[in-house]
């Protein structure tokens, strides 16, 4: 093969359609081929839609019940009027589950937004400057990691009073060191990469190297952690509510609190524990599936 | 005055607790404007470290760089980071070995070219974009207007190396350092890239330092060749002299070990015996002595000096018992380029 022929052969070589488009479009395409990712995305979509449209979807008010229908030892189960039956105070269970999605999503998103942004800021600062800045920040993160999350949440609730705000703050604080350490580690490995050396050899300024070269290439694990942290936040919120650390208003339909309140009726009306439990499991499963699929799509080593 | 003068460059990697490794040991060489030189040697002999040391890109911790690197009348060793950044990319640019990892995967090819133009010339975005397309065309990338918006993973290896060269040449540097630019590529693509380097660099009078372990690459492109062994220069000569009359046993061994098409089938290859680890410190003698077929007792008495081979002052060799000149006909011993 002559040089010219080889050149022509190389030029006519068609790229796989898979390779077209930017990195994130590629990742999305890869995820679309993963059935588990589709299931996860479906669950997440359902969860978000329910949370946003709860007032439209819910057939009854979640906080107003009809006590006259409740008799000792008997709580009406699913029926044509109340698809998931009534709860122990005669409120429509379906409406409460639908509204509960709002609180789970709200707590998850807000606590993630705060925790991840503070964590990313700390991690990026440590990764960009290194040296004593890095040392100081990471030791601080170590201290935060040493405090058990649940204990800390109880302390926050004791300090700020029982409220959704306390729950959000507690979960956000728990997330900070996780994101900070993850981003810093990722930046450290990118800092030694060939393209960073190449960029330095071209005289690119340090600030630009960090913002344009190192940071964008370090974000993949952080984004994966973001989806997984949403799942954890929902569980944590439910756990705190179960322990009585949720909203101060007892009428607020949090899934965790619903679980806790039905304990006494478990014998006669087990469905009241099943529905909020299933809601928690399905929403958490959705975020976990999406997170895992995202990690798989982003990491060439895990690709099959 | 030469464009780049490296004098007594010494790079030491500390490994803590007083242990250290001499990666480059008193290396001196120079090149004029538009000159092309090759630095040849096997893995670990200090080639890439030399390139990084010239640009001040070695890590500061645990690495000591001594000597002097004068570029265009300015001392680069010990220059401030800001000064070095103005030189890097603008006056000295570098092409790296692996185009698969040396391009940023999340930026488009175009962005990586315009970044350099904006940095050094303050070019505005639109002009930089136009210039990027022109540069990609210049390095032989077809459909450059489309390619400029693509990401590195959408380009083949050869295309990426072309893009790397386009980035390196964006600011029309006076000196291009190419560190094994063809090692990671297919053989056919290697030839194309070398041809491209010849067209764009050699013919536009940009000086070129080509770092390679492949004597064939040097034969086609470089006017002067420096052969390194264990961090020291062992032979320096114009290309034709080196290939026709290699005087150092190491260079001769390298040339003899190249497989040849014109030899009968089944003919054994001629490797250099031993491995690069079989070495002695230069202070105790010639580092190549343990592997050398021409070793004589004086080889182990102290470091051999670098001196002219015979009466050819331009042909320097560091050997006490150099290979005698056997063939006076250079054309028969020169490998095909």
Image (spheres, coloured by chain):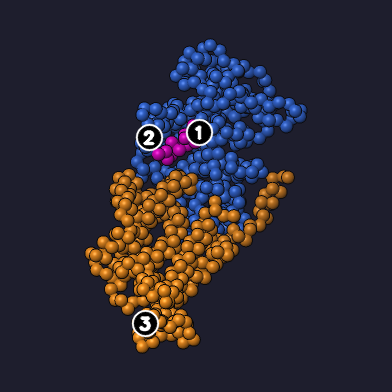
Quarter of the image for residue A33 reads bottom right
**Vertical relation: B277 (above or below) B55:** above
Judging by the rendered image, the residue that carries numbered circle 1 is B47
In space, the residues marked 1 and 2 are separated at their CA atoms by: 19 Å
Q: Chain of mark 2?
A: B
Say left or right for B309 vs A149: right
Circles 1, 3 touching at the beta carbon (< 8 Å): no
In space, the residues marked 3 and 2 are separated at their CA atoms by: 78 Å
Q: Within 10 angstroms of label 3, few (less than 14), some, or many (20 or more) residues?
A: few
In front: A252, or B6?
A252
Judging by the rendered image, the residue that carries numbered circle 3 is A72
Mark sitting earlier along the chain (1/2): 1
The answer to whether residue B104 is magenta is no
- Give the chain ID for the orange colour: A
From this viewpoint, which residue is outermost toward the right?
B264
Q: Are marks 1 and 3 on the same chain?
A: no
């Amino acid at each position: 093969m002559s040089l010219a022929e080889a050149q022509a052969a190389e030029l006519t070589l068609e790229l796989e359609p898979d390779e077209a488009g930017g990195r994130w479009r590629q990742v999305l395409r890869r995820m679309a081929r993963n059935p588990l990712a589709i299931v996860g995305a479906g669950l997440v979509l359902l969860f978000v839609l329910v949370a946003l449209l709860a007032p439209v979807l819910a057939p009854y008010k979640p906080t107003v019940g009809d006590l006259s229908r409740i008799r000792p030892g008997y709580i009406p189960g699913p029926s044509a009027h109340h698809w998931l039956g009534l709860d122990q105070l005669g409120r429509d269970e379906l409406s409460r589950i639908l509204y509960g999605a709002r609180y789970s999503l709200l707590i998850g998103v807000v606590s993630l937004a705060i925790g991840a942004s503070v964590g990313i800021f700390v991690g990026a600062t440590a990764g960009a400057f290194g040296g004593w800045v890095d040392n100081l920040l990471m030791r601080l993160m170590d201290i935060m990691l040493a405090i058990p999350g649940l204990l800390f949440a109880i302390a926050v609730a004791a300090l700020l009073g029982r409220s959704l705000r306390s729950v959000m703050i507690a979960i956000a604080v728990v997330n900070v060191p996780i994101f900070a350490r993850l981003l810093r580690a990722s930046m450290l490995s990118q800092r030694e990469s060939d393209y960073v050396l190449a960029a330095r050899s071209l005289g690119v300024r340090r600030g630009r190297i960090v913002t344009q070269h190192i940071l964008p290439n370090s974000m993949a694990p952080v984004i994966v952690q973001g989806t997984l942290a949403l799942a954890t936040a929902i569980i944590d919120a439910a756990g705190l509510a179960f322990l009585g650390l949720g909203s101060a208003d007892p009428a607020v339909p949090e899934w965790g609190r619903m679980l806790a309140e039905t304990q006494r009726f478990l014998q006669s009306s087990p469905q009241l524990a099943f529905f909020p439990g299933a809601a928690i499991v399905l929403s958490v499963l959705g975020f976990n599936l999406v997170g895992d699929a995202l990690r798989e799509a982003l990491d060439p080593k895990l690709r099959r | 005055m030469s464009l780049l003068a490296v004098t007594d460059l010494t790079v030491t990697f500390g490994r803590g607790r007083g242990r250290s490794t001499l990666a480059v040991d008193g290396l001196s060489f120079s090149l004029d404007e538009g000159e092309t030189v090759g630095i040849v040697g096997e893995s670990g002999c200090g080639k890439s470290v030399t390139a990084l040391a010239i640009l001040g890109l070695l890590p500061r911790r645990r690495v000591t760089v001594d000597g002097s690197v004068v570029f265009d009348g300015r001392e680069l060793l010990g220059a401030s980071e800001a000064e070095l950044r103005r030189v890097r990319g603008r006056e000295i640019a570098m092409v790296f070995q692996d185009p698969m990892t040396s391009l940023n995967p999340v930026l488009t090819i175009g962005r990586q070219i315009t970044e350099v133009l904006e940095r050094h010339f303050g070019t505005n975005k639109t002009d930089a974009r136009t210039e990027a397309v022109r540069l990609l065309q210049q390095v032989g990338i077809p459909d450059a207007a489309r390619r400029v918006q693509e990401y590195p993973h959408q380009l083949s290896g050869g295309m990426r190396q072309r893009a790397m060269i386009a980035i390196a040449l964006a600011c029309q540097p006076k000196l291009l350092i190419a560190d094994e630019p063809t090692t990671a590529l297919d053989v056919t693509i290697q030839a194309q890239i070398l041809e491209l380097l010849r067209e764009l660099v050699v013919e536009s009078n940009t000086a070129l330092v080509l770092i390679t372990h492949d004597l064939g690459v040097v034969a086609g492109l470089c006017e002067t060749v420096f052969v390194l062994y264990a961090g020291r220069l062992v032979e320096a000569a114009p290309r034709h002299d080196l290939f026709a009359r290699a005087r150092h046993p190491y260079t001769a061994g390298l040339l003899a070990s190249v497989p040849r098409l014109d030899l009968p089938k089944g003919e054994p290859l001629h490797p250099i015996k031993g491995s690069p680890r079989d070495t002695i410190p230069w202070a105790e003698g010639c580092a190549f002595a343990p592997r050398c077929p021409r070793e004589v007792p004086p080889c182990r008495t102290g470091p051999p000096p670098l001196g002219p081979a015979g009466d050819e002052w331009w042909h320097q060799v560091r050997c006490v018992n150099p290979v005698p000149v056997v063939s006076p006909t250079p054309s028969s011993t020169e490998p095909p380029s």
